[in-house]
Amino acid sequence: MSVNESLDSILQMPQRKLVVARNDVNLNKPIKNEIFILMIEESRGSAGGRAAGSGSRKISKVFGFLCDGGICSKRIELDDPIKIEMFDIPYSAVAMDILLSNGQPYVVQGIVDADFVARYNDIVSNLK
């Protein structure tokens, strides 16, 4: 399985996730992009993280990919709760249309936000 297929399969997992990207996610074009995927573990009663919902959302795993020239390489995969706590959840995430590497359209929850990506990169740099 290539890394691009790995990224596609993570994006298509049924588990709730938030995608945070520097640019629009279009995996079938050689566009430079940084993509973080936050796998979300929801407690009972959480209403998708909305303010009126009881319960809470927390990140259970973080993946980071760097895409350039049509190839996406996995930069990071974290499941250590202490390290994961450093990543803020972007509560402004909305339904986001992406294109998988085979050109298939897919909808995820996410946000295109260069500032969030820069903060995540700072966290990753400090973990090494």
Image (tube, grey):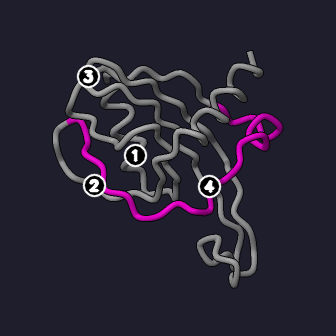
- Residue drawn at x 47%, y 28% as measured from the top left: 65
Identify the residue position indicated by label 2 in the image: 106
Nearest to the eye among marks 1 and 3: give it: 3
Location of residue 98 in the rendering, given as x and y in whole percent from the top left corner:
30, 49
Q: Mark 2 is on which residue type?
A: Tyr
Whole-number angstrom distance, CA of label 1 to CA of label 2: 9 Å
Element under disc 3:
loop
Where residue 24 sits, quadrant-wise, is top left
Query: Which one is in front, 77 or 26?
Result: 26
Q: Which residue is mark 4?
A: 90
Camera-near label (2 vs 4) is 4
Q: CA distance from mark 1 to mark 3?
A: 17 Å
Residue tagged 3:
70
Q: Residues within 10 Å of mark 2 (few under 14, many from 20)?
A: few
Residue 15 visible (yes or no): yes
The residue where tag 1 is placed is 11
Location of residue 50 with respect to 71 vertically, above or below: below
Packing grade of label 1 (10 A; few <14, some 14-19, many >=20) is many
Marked residue nearer the N-terminal end (1 or 2): 1
- Residue appearing at x 48%, y 23% in the figure: 74
Separation of disc 3 and disc 2 at Cα? 18 Å
Marks 1/2 in contact by CB < 8 Å: the verdict is yes
- Seen as rendered, the residue at the extreme right is 82
Q: Which residue lies most toward the bottom here?
A: 52
- The image shows residue 121 at horizontal and vertical percentages of 63, 27
In the figure, is residue 104 to the left or right of 68? left
- Identify the residue shown where x is 68% and y is 25%: 124
96 over 38 or under it: above or below: below
The boundaries of the magenta stretch are 78-101
